[in-house]
Image: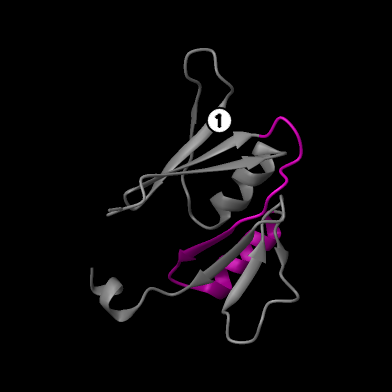
Amino acid sequence: MVVDLSLLVIRTSDIDAAKRFYEALGLLWREERHEGGPRHDSCRVGATLLELYPAKEAPRGRMRLGFRVDDPARAAEAAIAAGGRWRRDAHPGAGIILQDPDGNDVELAVPSEHEALG
C-alpha cells in the first residue's frame, strides 16, 4: 500500500531552462552528480524529492504536475517570464495551467483552507 510519494524525476531537453521555470514558481534547486552520473538538480517539495535530469533524447511522454502556491496569478506571470507558456486549450474551471519548457502541463492552485492552516 502506497502511503506517500518520495521521488519524482523530470527528464528535460534543457535542464537550465527547466530549472529557471521551476525556480520562478519558488523551487530552490541544488546541483548534484552521483558516482560519475550526469549533472542534475534536486529540491524538496514537501516530503517529495523532485529531480531534473537531462534527457538523452527529446522527452517523448508528457506529464501533468500540480503545485499549490500562495498566489497562482503571480506565480504564473513569473513562470511565463522564465520561459513557460500558457496552456491555451485548458478546460474551463481547471485553474491556471501552464506548460514548462518541455511541454509538461503545470497546474497552479491555492492551498485548501485545511492545508493553509498546516
Q: Position of residue 94 (x, y in %)?
A: 58, 80
> Which amino acid lies under the numbered mark 1 shown in the image of this protein?
His
State the residue position of label 1: 40
Q: Residue at x 71, y 38 (%)?
A: 14
Name which residue lies at 56% across and 79% down.
95
Q: Position of residue 103 (x, y in %)?
A: 72, 56
Which span of residues is magenta-colored? Answer: 55-82
| Depth check, front residue: 90 or 45 | 90
Give the residue at x 71% y 30%: 56
Viewer-nearest residue: 3 or 27: 3
* Quadrant of image for the C terminus: bottom left
Residue extending farthest to the bottom is 92
Q: Is residue 88 rendered magenta in the image?
A: no
Secondary element type, mark 1: strand
Q: Position of residue 110 (x, y in %)?
A: 43, 75
Front one among 70 and 14: 14
Q: Is residue 102 left or right of residue 66?
A: right
> In the image, 60: left or right of 110?
right
Residue lying farthest to the left in this orientation: 118
Within-10-Å neighbours for mark 1: few <14, some 14–19, many 20+: some
Q: Quadrant of residue 69?
A: bottom left
